[in-house]
Amino acid sequence: MALNPYPNIINSTDFAIFDFVSSGKKTLKKRVRFELIDDMEQVYNLALCTLLDDGTEDCETASRNGDMVRILETVGVIALMYTEHYPLRKIYFTGSDNLRTRQYQLSIFSQLQSIINYFDIEGLRIESEAVELREPFKAGKNYSAFIFTRKSL
């Protein structure tokens, strides 16, 4: 699926945390963290964060490191690793703001033919913290968030 992901992805023993290094304009430590948000449906939020020097995670600020495509390719590999270990779990993914979500949507669309080999994708429209729409991902439609479900291979 990914064309050029960052190497040396390190995961925790429970596969809840994955760390890698982003080498764009600066060298940044990045973290992908999975957290349960819907026990009944087994949906886990995927948070993409920058690890700061003091060890805290910044999951809100865009790092603007010039390597977003490569970071998202790495996140794709991590999603594959995670769902290989937990095939029944679904991954919820959204940006920290509307612009970031839109960028993620464009990346999903650009890699759609590869992604659909591994995942079913749903698009969600969320208004006032309530899901207004949940449907199979459609190109050209704007969504607030996405849910990835691993296909049985």
Image (cartoon, grey):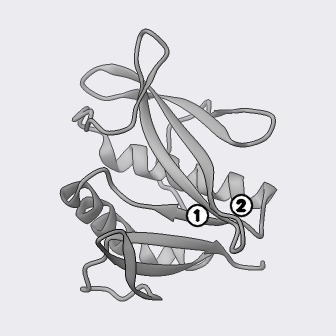
**Pointer 1 residue:** 91
**Residue 150 location in percent, x, y?**
68, 72
Residue closest to the far top: 54
Say which element carries label 2: helix
Tell me which residue sits at (72%, 73%) in the image. 40
Residue 131's spot in the image, x, y percent?
41, 79
Q: Quadrant of residue 152?
A: bottom right
Query: Do the numbered discs 2 and 1 sit on residues whose CB atoms are within 8 Å?
Result: yes
What is the quadrant of the N terminus in the image? bottom right
Query: Where in the figure is residue 64, as x and y percent of width and height?
Result: 22, 35
Rendered location of residue 58, percent (x, y): 38, 30
Residue furthest to the left: 99
Q: What residue appears at the point 41 percent right and 43 percent down from the top-left corner?
A: 71
Q: Does 50 sit left or right of 92 as displayed? A: left
Quadrant hosting residue 149: bottom right
What quarter of the picture does the C terminus occupy?
bottom right
Q: Mark 2 points at which residue?
A: 83
Secondary structure of residue under mark 1 = strand
Q: Residues within 10 Å of mark 2 (few under 14, many from 20)?
A: many
Q: Which of marks 2 and 1 is nearer the N terminus?
A: 2
Residue 28 shown left or right of residue 103 in the figure: right
Q: Amino acid under label 1?
A: Ile
Position of residue 67 relative to residue 3, above or below, is: above
In the figure, residue 134 lies in which quadrant?
A: bottom left
Density class for disc 1 (Cα within 10 Å; few <14, some 14-19, many ≥20) is many
In the image, is residue 139 above or below residue 9? Answer: below
Q: Nearer the viewer, residue 34 or 128?
A: 128
In the depicted view, which residue is nearer to us: 75 or 99? 99
How far apart marks 2 and 1 lie (CA) works out to 9 Å
In this orientation, which residue lies closer to the viewer: 46 or 3?
A: 46
For image coordinates 31% across by 39% down, the residue present is 60
